[in-house]
Amino acid sequence: EVQLVESGGGLVQAGESLRLSCAASGFTFARYAIGWFRQAPGKEREGVSCISPKDGTTYYADSVKGRFTISRDNAKNTMYLQMNSLKPEDTAVYYCAADPTNGLLIYAGEYDYWGQGTQVTVSS
């Protein structure tokens, strides 16, 4: 059974940092495309960042470029999202996602597997 479990969310002040983790199980993690998405109240789920298993190519939404860093540790079956210089507009539920496609998947509809989400709240 494929499982993705996020952790690391919380309440921080603007300018601070958080690191989200997503522990994966039930599949060959190293072969899967992975990504982070977020959804704020009343808004659609949006792509934050993703990474290809093929060559490690990464994608970042313009709103997080230079502040967020995605990474994966295939030995630990875990993906991370390091979030620095957080802003109030980063407040959302953050989800990790995985898919067996061997490429860079930017859109939520491309992913088969999802975590339950972790809340990130940034106060001003």
Image: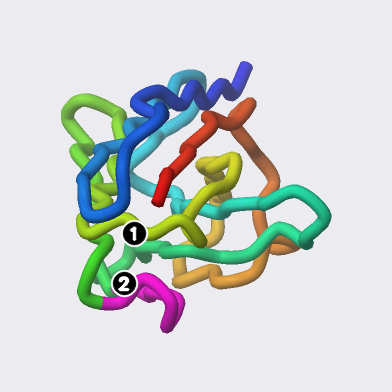
Q: Earlier in the sequence, mark 2 or mark 1?
A: 1
Q: What's drawn in magenta, residue-wise?
A: 58-65
Kind of residue at badge 2: Thr
Residue 109 pos. (x, y %): 75, 62
Residue named by callout 1:
53
Please give the name of the residue rendered at 21% of the width and 46% of the height, measured from the top-left corner. 16
Residue named by callout 2:
58
Say left or right for 1 vs 79.
right
Q: Secondary structure beneath disc 2?
A: strand
Residue 84 pos. (x, y %): 21, 55
Please give the name of the residue rendered at 28% of the width and 74% of the height, measured from the top-left corner. 57
Name the quadrant containing residue 114: top right
Kind of residue at badge 1: Pro
Question: Alpha-carbon neighbours of circle 2 within 10 Å: few (<14), some, or many (≥20)?
Answer: some
User: Would you say residue 70 is visible in this rendering?
Assistant: no
In the image, farthest residue toward the right: 42
Q: Secondary structure beneath disc 1?
A: loop
